[in-house]
Amino acid sequence: MIYNKIMKKIFSLTILFCWMFNIFPAYGEVIHGHAEKNDTYQEQMQKELFTGEIEELEKKDVITMTVSQVLDSTINIEGDEFFAEVTSEVYGNKGVIIPKGTIAHGKITQTSDPKRLGRSGWLELDFDYLITPDGREIPIEGKMSTKLHPIAETGKIVAQDLGYTVAGGAVGGFLALNWLGLEAAILSQGYTVAGGAAVGGAIGLGAALIRKGHDVLIAPGDEIRVKINTSIPLPVYKDTALMQHELFYPGLDINISDIKHEKDPFGEINTLTLTILISNLSDKSLSGLDMALVNDYNAIFRPSVFGDTKIMFKQINPGDRVAGQISFSVDNINRKFWLTFFDKRNGKPLCKISLDNAYRKVSDKTKRKNEKLKKKKTDFKKETDLFDIE
C-alpha cells in the first residue's frame, strides 16, 4: 500500500513538471494529425480517363435514358424521386463526354389523369444531376414529358375518333345489309345501307365522345429522351477508358462483327442478333449451348430459338472455325452484356466478350438502323389489367 502511494505521488509530480515546462500541450488543446492528399494519384487517374480536351454539353442536347423502376401515373405522385441510366453515349465534336451507364437523378414534377375525349394521362420529369461511372457528380437541368403537343394531341384524337366513326359506319352498313337483305338495298338504290351507316356512325361518334384516354406507365427498358436546358463544360473521355473488362481463354478467339437490335415474334424490341466468328485453337470442345449473354446484373440469357439456330446446336471442336448469326432474347436491350462461354465441367466462364466493346466497331449503317428502331414513338400506354373490375 505504501509503495502504491509513493508511485502515485511520483506520477503526479511528473505530470505537473511536464505541464509547467510545456513538454506536452496544455489541457484543452487539440492535437492535430497530418494527412496529405495524393495529388499525383488523381493526376494519374485524370490522364488515364480523359484526353485533356473540353467539350460543351449544350442546351437542347438530348440524352437517352431508361428508368430504374416503374413510373406509373396511377401510383406515383408529384415529388417522387427516381433514378435513370444513360443508354447511349453523348458525343461532342472530339469524343464522348457522357458515357453509357451514367446514372441520372430525377423527380416527378407533374402528373395528370386520363380525360374524356381520349386524352391520355401524362407525367413530367425533371433531372437535376448525373453521376458518371468514374464518380463525378454533374449538375444539370433536364426535362422529359409524355404529354403530347396540343396540336399533335388533337390530331391524334381526331384520327382515333375518325377510326371509331368509320368503324361504326361500316358495322352499321353491314347490319342493314344483313337485316333488310341485298334485294332491299338494290330496290332502295342503296338508301338502306346508307341509313344503316349513318346510325352506325352516330354510335361510333358517341363511343368516341365518352371514352377516356390511357394511364401512363414508363418501365425499365423503355427509352426516354431528356432535353438539356443548361450548357456545361465537360472533359472528353479516352476510348480506352470506356472499354469494358473482358475474359479470354488461350486459343479461343471470338470476333463479333455485327450487333442488330430486333423485335421478337410478339413485336417487343428485346432481341440482340450477333454476327460472330469463332476460331477454336484451344484444348476445349465447345457447343453453342455453352454460350449465353450475361448482363451487368449477372442475369443469364441463352440463345433464342426464334433466331438462326445453326450455331446454337453446333459442336465446336479444337481446330474448328465457325461463322454465323445467333440471337438472344433479353429483358432490357439497353443493359451491358458479355457473350460468355461456360466450361461444361464446372459451369464457370471460360471467356467473356463485351458487346459494348464490339459495338464500337459495328458499321454506322447498323447503328443507324438500331437507333431508328429504338426511337420509334411510344405513347407509354398502360395496358388495362384483365383482372381489374370497374
Image (tube, rainbow, N blue to C red):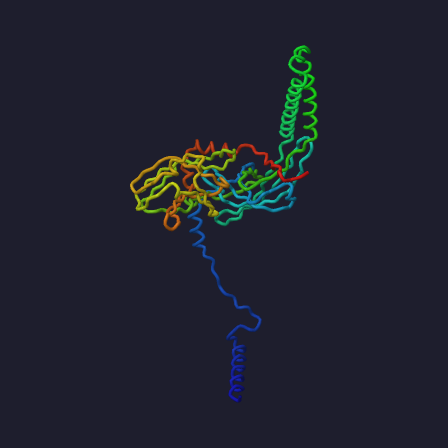
Q: Residue 15: give x, y in percent of width and height.
A: 53, 79
Q: Is residue 389 visible?
A: yes
Q: Residue 46: give x, y in percent of width and height.
A: 44, 49
Q: Is residue 71 above or below residue 363?
A: below
Q: Residue furthest left?
A: 319
Name the foreground residue: 357 vs 205. Answer: 205
Q: Residue at x 53, y 72 (%)?
A: 25
Q: Residue 187: give x, y in percent of width and height.
A: 67, 10
Name the foreground residue: 347 vs 52. Answer: 347
Q: Residue at x 50, y 41 (%)?
A: 331
Quarter the C terminus occupies: top right
Name the foreground residue: 74 vs 141. Answer: 74
Q: Residue at x 51, y 88 (%)?
A: 3
Q: Is residue 51 visible?
A: no
Q: Is residue 256 above or below residue 15?
A: above
Count of marks overlaid on the render: 0
